[in-house]
Image (cartoon, coloured by chain):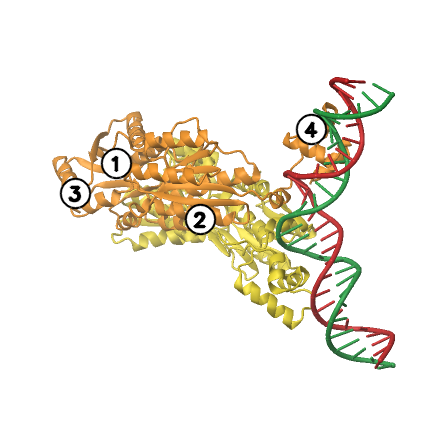
Chain colours: A yellow, B orange, C red, D green
Amino acid sequence: MEKIYTIKDIAELAGVSKGTVDRVLHKRGKVSQDALDRVNEVLDKIDYQPNLMARSLKKTQIYSICVLLPDSQNDPYWQPCIDGINEAKKEFKSFNVKVEIFLFDATSTASFVETNKAVLNASPDAVLLVPLFHKEAIDAIETYNSKGIISSIFNNQLKSSSIKSFVGQDLFQSGRIAARLLDLLLQKGTIAIIHIDEDYENAIHMQEKEKGFRDYFDQLENRAFEIKTFKVKHPQFKTTLKEYLESNPTISGLFVTTSKAYQVAKIIAKNPERKIALVGYDLLENNLEYLNNKTIDFLIHQNPKRQAYLGTTNLIEHFIFEKEITAEKLLPIDIINTENAKDYFL
Amino acid sequence: MEKIYTIKDIAELAGVSKGTVDRVLHKRGKVSQDALDRVNEVLDKIDYQPNLMARSLKKTQIYSICVLLPDSQNDPYWQPCIDGINEAKKEFKSFNVKVEIFLFDATSTASFVETNKAVLNASPDAVLLVPLFHKEAIDAIETYNSKGIISSIFNNQLKSSSIKSFVGQDLFQSGRIAARLLDLLLQKGTIAIIHIDEDYENAIHMQEKEKGFRDYFDQLENRAFEIKTFKVKHPQFKTTLKEYLESNPTISGLFVTTSKAYQVAKIIAKNPERKIALVGYDLLENNLEYLNNKTIDFLIHQNPKRQAYLGTTNLIEHFIFEKEITAEKLLPIDIINTENAKDYFL
DNA sequence: ATTTTAATTGTGTTCGAGCACATTTTAACA
DNA sequence: TGTTAAAATGTGCTCGAACACAATTAAAAT
């Protein structure tokens, strides 16, 4: 247990006053070369760790962080994020940080833009956002950057030099995991990748998952599988998928790239004679229902709660502990079946 | 954003001095009924949150926590625990807590007892330990309790009213998960539960896993499986298991209840014509090797790092933030295959 | 050499809680 | 009623860092 040095200790060792040490440490005001050298000599010799309690007690500045994510009203996937953010808030409530949540409509680009404006209006020190809309997100992040506001993202990856941090999963690998599971479930046959609802061209996450999925089967020695892709949007969803399955009687496995596996499950559950293996995403209540009755075989957990929690704490700790912001944090990709599902809610 | 009250604020509101408020808050010294009522009235009305920075700045007392776990020299399973504890140490290094690690020999009851003595000698404020030896652990915990030292455990459950906290997994459920996976892999046939090395009668964790495993198959409607149990200790391990498998040619699945699945894998890998499904525990390097060459189909991750981390932080936060100690924290039981294994090392 | 100005260095207060000690009030007793 | 003991209450310092401001020293200008 090494000695813990204070500014006063350093001042004494260097033969100057604590004011001078302070000036050296914070590079403020003018210090003579002589004093500078003497203080630096001491600083080199010892490992000075500023007392964070004392610092944050003195500092009256309150850091402000805004978190921008989709409203869970339209998509329950986002609800756990709110919980994660609130957990982070609670954990650091004694510190000088204010965390505000801003929700936008995941179906509306305009809403995303507008909410970003509102965030800008609050002029926070940092923003954590879900960059659902590629172009608009880039714009927003550039604007934040130009105002000196730190931007971090979670859930989706998005390349931009203005982004300080990303928390999420390796979606390519995520696709591979789905592939491995269906390989195990089926051994051979035809599998369809189902992209529901979102615009495939703009949804990089779907593309990445598909790439990983196909990559797995491409690398398999025996070409026992045939992989198809099926894209469908909501309004005609039910009939279209039904027809698709009927016209492709060889399909014995489905990989749903979004959290909407329950919608697919609802359809295939109506025809229990035809056993179709089904792998999807996220622990929504609807999904769990079909997981428990074994219509869905596996769910892949994207851990939105932890993503939001880590994204938030990463920023908080940067401000109050001067921690470096972790540029990329990839969370484990959890495989969920009937038996371990409920453990993930604690 | 509600106002943050200080002791001074409360004193003014109640019309007393901050000394009196302090006495009320800490129930020390004598306070007149009148003053007590007035302060409590204010306290009821507002939500006073003591400033933890100020508190820990003032308090010079250093809390001491000892963590007692098996040496990873004999069993690499324990290495991640050390990492988890060090992570906790690092995170809270600015605070007045000292965390010391004590290692014992997992194969020696005497070593466990002795290490507990050493811990007692250090007279810490709390102890976090792995209660590997049932009787001796109970004894140690009782001793700690009698000296006013808080005891928490992780990895193994152990019932005692003197234990303040347990971090671990639901082992019964863990067995069920293994069962579900083998069900999926095989659909039908004979499966053997393999208990390696440890003394089954004293290893409750093995018993619980077996119970859960059997429970799953008992609840299955179609009795498509036959479940056997096989116990073996190290010296004769190799030949015994080989003979066992040869004399039971119908066995097509194995469930190894410890982290030693690689030892089993080594044997069955020698006879690749006979395909045997294998599910085991823990992300040891040896296990991962056989997972990657698909001799092991699934590993169940017991997350020792996180267990140790949470056990430690739980105690630290109790001391510095006066948080309640969480009595039981059950971690999710992660299912690992070739594709998601490496994600768990971040 | 003396004044003025700039550069450097030191001192003292603050943040909020905790606690020792000083002071005041109340109760007890002669 | 006065004295003393006991109970209650208030005051002031401390923790370490930050920062404003005062004090000192050095350099420049007269």
How far apart in space, not on screen, are marks 3 and 2 (Cα)? 37 Å
In the rendered structure, which amino acid carries the disc numbered 2?
A: Asn
Kindly state the secondary structure of the residue where label 3 is placed: helix
* Residue where numbered disc 3 is placed: B238
Could you tell me residue A289's position as x and y percent? Answer: 43, 32
The earlier-in-sequence mark between 3 and 1 is 1
Residue A39 appears in the rendering = yes
How busy is the neighbourhood of tag 1: few (under 14 within 10 Å), some, or many (20 plus)? some
Q: Residue under circle 2?
A: B86
Q: Residue at x 42, y 37 (%)?
A: B120
Q: CA distance from mark 4 to mark 3?
A: 69 Å
Please rate how many residues cluster around mark 3, counting C-alpha atoms within 10 Å: few if below 14, some from 14 to 19, many from 20: some
Horizontal relation, residue B343 to residue C14: left or right: left
Label 3 and label 2 in one chain: yes
Q: Residue at (38%, 36%) from the top-left corner?
A: A296
What chain letter is assigned to the residue under label 4?
B
* Circle 3: residue type: Lys
User: Percent position (x, y) of residue B28?
Assistant: 64, 30
**Residue to which mark 4 is pinned:** B44
Quarter of the figure with residue B188: top left
| Label 2: element kind | helix
Name the residue tied to disc 1: B198
Q: Nearer the viewer, mark 4 or mark 3?
A: 4
Question: In the image, what residue type sits under mark 4?
Answer: Asp
Dot 4 or dot 1: first in sequence order is 4
Pinpoint the chain carrying mark 2. B
